[in-house]
Each structure stands twice: as structure tokens, then as C-alpha cells.
Amino acid sequence: MLVKARAARPATRLTALKGVVQRFSFLFLILVSITLMIFGRIDAIGVESMRARVMDAFEPILDAISTPAATVARFVEIIADVTEVYRQNQELRTENARLQQWKQVVLRLEAENNSLRSLLRFKPDPAASFISARVIAVPGGSFLRSVIVAAGRRDGLRKGQAVIAGSGLVGRVVEVGEWSARILLVTDISARVPVLLEGSRQRAVLAGDNSSQPRLLYLPPDSQVAVGDRVVTSGHGGQFPSGLPVGVVSQVGERQIRVHSLVNLSRIEHVQIVDFGLPGGLVVEDPLGGVMR
């Protein structure tokens, strides 16, 4: 008990001291203020000098305090600017993505429109009927030149029908399903089309060899062929009517004559499958004997 009483005495004294300080602190501050006012009236120059010295003394501290504050303020402004730039950038990205989507739609529609417009260049016989179809696949392979179209038996397609794109013949129907069909292009190695030179009326056979430019076969030795001569179907064999444009002569050599198609066969998007009411099954007589189909 005695130990506890001795330990409590300093605490009691400290509490009493705090009470005295608090009681007279307000009075002390008032006296200091009055003294400074009187002193400032008496010696304003001295007070100003003392105030300047106090400011000089506290200048490093104030500078040290103000520099981080300004830095923090600038940093906050930078963060705000970066946030605003990021927001605007996100809005621009979204708008750009939306514009890119619209651009792709416009380009696709423009390409489709141009492709469909090109079909109007060919005017089929009024007695003929035709179906426009979209190319949906190009089967791969080094020895096959064909395309798949989104039209089939339900649309009236049948084997042997002529296929036209743009302003020229591109091939014929060789396989027909219920919903799709395969078109054999004139550049395929198995393709044979009876043709004639429009100017000289010389008959020949257009033979594909899997290159971009098929050859002319079975021309008479004395045939006058020049680069630029138009090549059209002859109507021989009953597969195609006469006069369908096929291409123009692009190369004349001693061993071969090449024909450049009027249609870019590597970029076909839409075709017309034309039914001329002719019997199917291409039959071409081989001058050397036999029959080619």
C-alpha cells in the first residue's frame, strides 16, 4: 500500500501542474499579444526586422515543405491528365473499332455490288434461264481448278450447265448436290471447250492445263492467229451455245497458243449458272480419233 501511495504522488503532482498551466496559458497568451502590439507600435522597424529574421530562419523549412506539396499537386494534375487521356483514348479505340467494322461492311458490300454488277455485262439469250450464286469455297490441290457455289439441285442446277462471271465463260457444272454444286473452271487440266477465233472463224479446242492461261489445240497449221484475237465458244458439241466470250489470245508460239481469260478466275465471288436448254454432256471430237468429254 505504501508503494502504491508513493507511485500515485507524481501523477497527482503532474495533474495539478497541468491544471495550473491550462488556467494561466490563456492569460499568458493575451499578455504576450499585448506586449508585441505595444512593441510593434514603439519600434516598428525592429519588429519588421525580427519578423524578417524569423521568416529567413523558417525559409528552408517552408521551402522543404512547399516543394513536396507542389510536386504532389503537379503529380495529381498529371494523374488527372493521364486519366482523361486514357478515357479519351478508350473512346477513340471504341469508335475506331466501330468504324472499322462499318468499313469492312462497306467494302464487302462494295465488292459484292461490283461482282453482281459485272454479271450484267453478259446478256443471255431470252430463252435461256440463269441462276446467280455465290462462291463459297475453292477446293485446294495442285491438279484441280474448281469452285463450290451455294446453289444446287433445289435451285434447278444440273450437270453440264454453263457458268459465266463478268463478261466471259468460266466453266461448267460437273457435280450437283441438293444445296451446292462444283464448277469446273476452263483452266482445269480436264477442261475442254470447243471455241473459234472470232475474226478468222477458225475452230479450235480450249484446253486447260492448270495454269492461269489455257491453250488452243487443233488449229490448222495455216491458221493466222495474232495476239489480241477474241476467242468465243463455237457451239460445237452441244454443250455451249455459240458466241459466248471466253478470252483473248495472249501468246502465239510455234508449239502453243495461250488464251487470257476475260475473267480473273482467282477472284470469282459470284457466278451465273445458265441453262440454254442444250443437252448435257460435252462431247468434242478429237481429230486424232476418239472422243473427249
Image: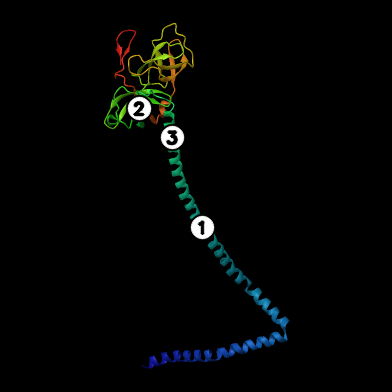
In the image, residue 167 sits, relative to residue 47, either above or below, namely: above
Q: Nearer the viewer, residue 68 or 201?
A: 201
User: What's the image's color scheme?
Assistant: rainbow
Task: Specify the quadrant that holds the C terminus.
Answer: top left
Give the amino acid at mark 3.
Answer: Asn
Q: Which type of secondary structure does the marked residue at label 1 adopt?
A: helix
Q: Which residue is mark 2?
A: 130
In the image, residue 173 sits, relative to residue 65, either above or below, namely: above
Q: Which residue is mark 3?
A: 113
Check residue 84 in the rendering and tell me which mark sits there, or answer none: 1
The spot of residue 268 in percent (x, y) is 40, 29
The spot of residue 258 in percent (x, y) is 44, 16
Residue located at (59% from left, 68% from top): 66
Comes first in the chain, label 3 or label 2: 3
In the image, taking residue 14 as reference, residue 71 lies left or right, namely: right
Q: Which type of secondary structure does the marked residue at label 2 adopt?
A: strand
Residue located at (45% from left, 38% from top): 107
Crowding around mark 3 (Cα neighbors within 10 Å: few <14, some 14 to 19, many 20+) is few
Q: Is residue 272 visible?
A: yes
Spatial separation of the CA atoms under disc 2 and disc 1: 59 Å
Q: Which type of secondary structure does the marked residue at label 3 adopt?
A: helix
Comes first in the chain, label 2 or label 1: 1
Q: Quadrant of residue 171?
A: top left
The spot of residue 272 in percent (x, y) is 37, 28
Looking at the rendered image, the disc whose residue lies closer to the viewer, 2 or 1, is 2
Q: Is residue 144 visible?
A: no
Spatial separation of the CA atoms under disc 3 and disc 2: 18 Å
In the image, taking residue 109 as reference, residue 56 lies left or right, namely: right
In the image, residue 126 sits, relative to residue 109, either above or below, namely: above
The spot of residue 192 in percent (x, y) is 35, 17
Check residue 162 in the rendering and tell me which mark sits there, or answer none: none
